[in-house]
Amino acid sequence: MSAAKHLLAATAAAGIFAAGFLAGCGSGGSGGEQAKGPPIAPLEQRWSQDTLGEYQRRLQLTPSQVEKIRPMFGETAARMGELRQSLKAELHATLRRMNERVSAELTVEQRREFVALIREKQAGR
């Protein structure tokens, strides 16, 4: 296999991995209290609650310290959610551009199968 084909295969594998990662990031969630401010997605909310709880246990925080620290977790979790959404959009655009480039190298028959393959992968997410 040529170096270009190895690179293409590696890029495709990385794209599939990234898409799977993003699909996984969008799942999950837990209830519970969250800090005032912008809405926090379930993944970040869970991170915020779990990490604050760990800090409370490991650092033996006082109730006063917890109340001062809690808003910091809410702000950080909200920003993490914004970054995740931005990264998700950028990754999708990168994968779309790669797929367009791959498609341009395929025969008509290969392109039909390629479209079916992409749709199957999207349905799996």
Image (spheres, helix red, strand yellow):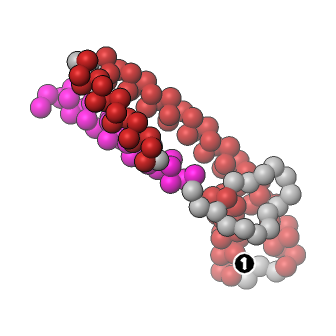
Q: Identify the image quadrant of residue 41.
A: bottom right
Which of 34 and 31 lies nearest the eye of the viewer?
A: 31
Visible residue check, residue 69: no
Q: Is residue 1 above or below residue 108?
A: below
Number of marks present in the image shown: 1
Q: Is residue 20 above or below residue 31?
A: above
Looking at numbered disc 1 in the image, what kind of residue is underneath it? Gln
Q: Secondary structure at mark 1?
A: helix
Tell whether 40 sits left or right of 103: right
Residue 8, position as x, y percentages in the image? 27, 30
The residue positioned 26% from the left and 18% from the top of the image is 108
The N terminus: image quadrant:
top left
Q: Is residue 14 above or below residue 55?
A: above
Q: Which residues are magenta?
A: 1-26
* Residue 109: in magenta span: no
The residue positioned 33% from the left and 36% from the top of the image is 117
* Residue annotated with mark 1: 56
The residue positioned 81% from the left and 49% from the top of the image is 38
Tell whether 50 sits left or right of 21: right
Q: Is residue 17 above or below residue 109?
A: below
Visible residue check, residue 74: yes
Tell whether 114 sits left or right of 36: left
Residue 44, position as x, y percentages in the image? 66, 57
Residue 32, position as x, y percentages in the image? 76, 69
Mark 1 packing: few (<14 Cα in 10 Å), some, or many (20+)?
Answer: some
Tell whether 40 sits left or right of 29: right
